[in-house]
């Protein structure tokens, strides 16, 4: 008799378009497993944890209550469980992040003679595959995207809940309680995709830059946990949808960069910036707190930071504006902001978050030219032209009509005065940058 297999779900919480599930099912019964691993859960932040738990509940429902959940260090609990059921193999979608890669290597070793089989990954093209002709990784997005397109990817895998003969094991942990605001799971992800595909996708090129509109897909959290695979989305795209495809390529690019340089989750990609002078100390901490709470006195920055606290999500354009403000107006280290984002974002993803922050800070790949410093007032006027976005998240400004919400000198007394003078801080930033450039 063929021994059972374990399908260890991690960032692939779905049953459709799932090559690893098909590989696991290619034999006897399959035990669906999820491991609650404190090393990942503790730093995740409450919103992301709640969303994960809801996604697990949805997967468990899809599997008719068979998802087996255990708590502990995967290096210990996965081999224990495999031995207990006499598994012939443990199947996974490859994890390409710094912690996941190391953990998987240890699990593989601890499994001994039991196969550890990686099939597919959370990306259309597994990180590490797209390379220059000399074998080196790409450091700049546009040529990466071209090579990524040339490389191509498979059609979605034909899998569903009936693809495997699922096994139910007694015992196991209960999925922790907690309800996420965002509907969780594969079905919700596919519905979100269909709504967007049949609606806002047509105007995505212009609509995606307007935080006052619902112009983006809201799929990042689903992609983060693999409730939907990017291949499923890419297969639906038509001519004219290049900008959306390109955004998915950014996600793949940053995963690729992190795969090649795992240390860049914590360190500057461009080591020249190690010498960059940041503000630290008590006054810097106080400024940081004001930024976190949306009390900077710059309306679009405050609206973004308050949106993050209220909804655990922030529009991409505003993420760029608030990040630029933290780094170039407040002169604080990018990783302070990145940590705050990871704690609050429902779509917090190490590769995308750290590398977008580094891009804004000028120390990442593609180096956004450091001297191009966002002016938070003109950015607000341009991308929130009627002031609706600001008024939605900043109650003190609800009585201010139209785009006047962006005019610093014309705001009500109960709204904070600007904490810094943008023109002055811009010059300070440029001087500090010059010191790095010429050092
Ligand atoms: C400072 C900063 C921090 C960020 N942190 C994260 C993060 O932790 N997790 C995360 O998924 N994205 C992050 N982003 C990228 C982007 O803001 C979000 O992916 C996007 O806002 C999510 O909303 P959406 O799904 O509606 O995006 P859409 O506009 O609908 O885009 C579709 C998908 O493309 C991908 N994508 C879009 N833009 C980017 C980008 N710049 N980089 C990488 N992937 C992208 C995402 O997977 C997204 O779901 C960050 C951007 C900045 C500037």
Image: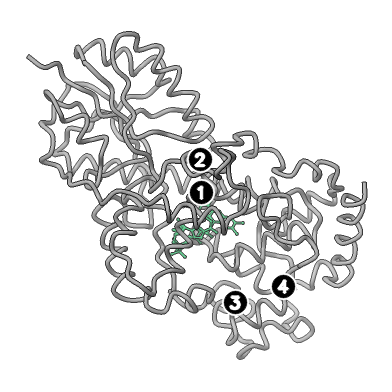
Disc 4 residue: CB within 8 Å of ligand 1: no
As measured in the structure, the alpha-carbon distance from the residue carrying label 3 to the one carrying label 4 is 12 Å
Residue 44 image label: 2
**Residue 80 drawn above or below residue 297:** above
As measured in the structure, the alpha-carbon distance from the residue carrying label 3 to the one carrying label 1 is 23 Å
**Residue 385 drawn above or below residue 200:** below
As measured in the structure, the alpha-carbon distance from the residue carrying label 2 to the one carrying label 3 is 28 Å
Q: Quarter of the image for the N terminus: give it.
A: top left
Asked if residue 410 lies left or right of residue 255, the reply is: right
Residue 390 image label: 3
Of the two numbered discs 2 and 4 in the rendering, the one whose residue sits closer to the viewer: 4
User: Which residue matches tag 1?
Assistant: 348
From the top left corner, tell me how far across and down residue 193 is, in percent. Answer: 31, 63
SS class, disc 3: helix
From the top left corner, tell me how far across and down residue 347 is, in percent. Answer: 47, 52
SS class, disc 2: helix
SS class, disc 4: helix
Tell me the residue at 67%/51% (across/down).
358
- Residue closer to the observer: 155 or 173: 155
As measured in the structure, the alpha-carbon distance from the residue carrying label 4 to the one carrying label 1 is 24 Å
Callout 4: 10 Å neighbours few (<14), some, many (20+)?
Answer: many
- Dot placed on the residue nearer the N-terminal end, 4 or 1: 1
Of the two numbered discs 1 and 2 in the rendering, the one whose residue sits closer to the viewer: 1
Residue 376 image label: 4
Marks 2/3 in contact by CB < 8 Å: the verdict is no
**Residue 8 drawn above or below residue 388:** above
From the top left corner, tell me how far across and down residue 239 is, in percent. Answer: 35, 72
């Amino acid at each position: 008799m063929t021994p059972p297999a374990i399908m260890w779900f991690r960032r692939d919480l779905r049953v459709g378009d799932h090559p690893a599930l098909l590989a696991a099912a290619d034999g006897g019964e399959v035990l669906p497993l999820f491991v609650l691993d404190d090393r990942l859960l503790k730093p995740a932040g409450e919103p992301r944890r709640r969303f994960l738990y809801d996604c697990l509940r949805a997967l468990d429902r899809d599997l008719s209550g068979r998802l087996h959940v255990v708590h502990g260090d995967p290096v210990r609990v996965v081999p224990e469980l495999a031995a207990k059921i006499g598994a012939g193999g443990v199947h996974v979608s490859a994890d390409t992040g710094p912690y996941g890669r190391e953990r998987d290597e240890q699990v593989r070793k601890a499994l001994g003679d039991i196969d550890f089989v990686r099939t597919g990954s959370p990306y259309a093209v597994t990180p590490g595959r797209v390379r220059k002709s000399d074998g080196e990784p790409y450091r700049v997005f546009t040529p990466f995207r071209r090579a990524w397109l040339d490389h191509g990817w498979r059609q979605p895998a034909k899998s569903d809940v009936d693809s495997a003969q699922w096994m139910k094991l007694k015992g196991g942990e209960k999925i922790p309680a907690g309800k996420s605001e965002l509907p969780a799971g594969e079905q919700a992800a596919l519905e979100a995709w269909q709504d967007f595909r049949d609606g806002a996708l047509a105007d995505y090129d212009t609509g995606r830059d307007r935080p006052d509109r619902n112009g983006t897909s809201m799929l990042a959290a689903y992609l983060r946990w693999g409730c939907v695979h990017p291949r499923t989305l890419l297969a639906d795209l038509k001519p004219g949808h290049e900008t959306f495809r390109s955004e998915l390529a950014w996600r793949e690019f940053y995963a690729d960069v992190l795969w090649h340089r795992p240390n860049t989750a914590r360190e500057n990609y461009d080591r020249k910036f190690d010498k960059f002078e940041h503000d630290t100390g008590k006054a810097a901490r106080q400024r940081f707190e004001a930024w976190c709470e949306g009390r900077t006195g710059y309306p679009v920055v405050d609206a973004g930071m308050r949106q993050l606290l209220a909804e655990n999500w922030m529009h991409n354009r505003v993420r760029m504006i608030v990040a630029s403000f933290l780094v170039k107006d407040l002169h604080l280290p990018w990783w302070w902001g990145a940590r705050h984002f990871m704690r609050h974002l429902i779509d917090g993803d190490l590769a995308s978050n750290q590398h977008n922050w580094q891009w804004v800070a000028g120390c990442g790949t593609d180096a956004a030219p450091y001297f191009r410093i966002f002016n938070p007032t003109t950015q607000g006027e341009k991308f929130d032209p009627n002031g609706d976005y600001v008024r939605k998240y900043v109650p003190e400004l609800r009585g201010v009509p139209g785009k006047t919400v962006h005019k610093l000198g014309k705001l009500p007394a109960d709204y904070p005065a600007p904490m810094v003078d943008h023109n002055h801080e811009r010059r300070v930033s440029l001087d500090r940058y010059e010191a790095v450039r010429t050092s």
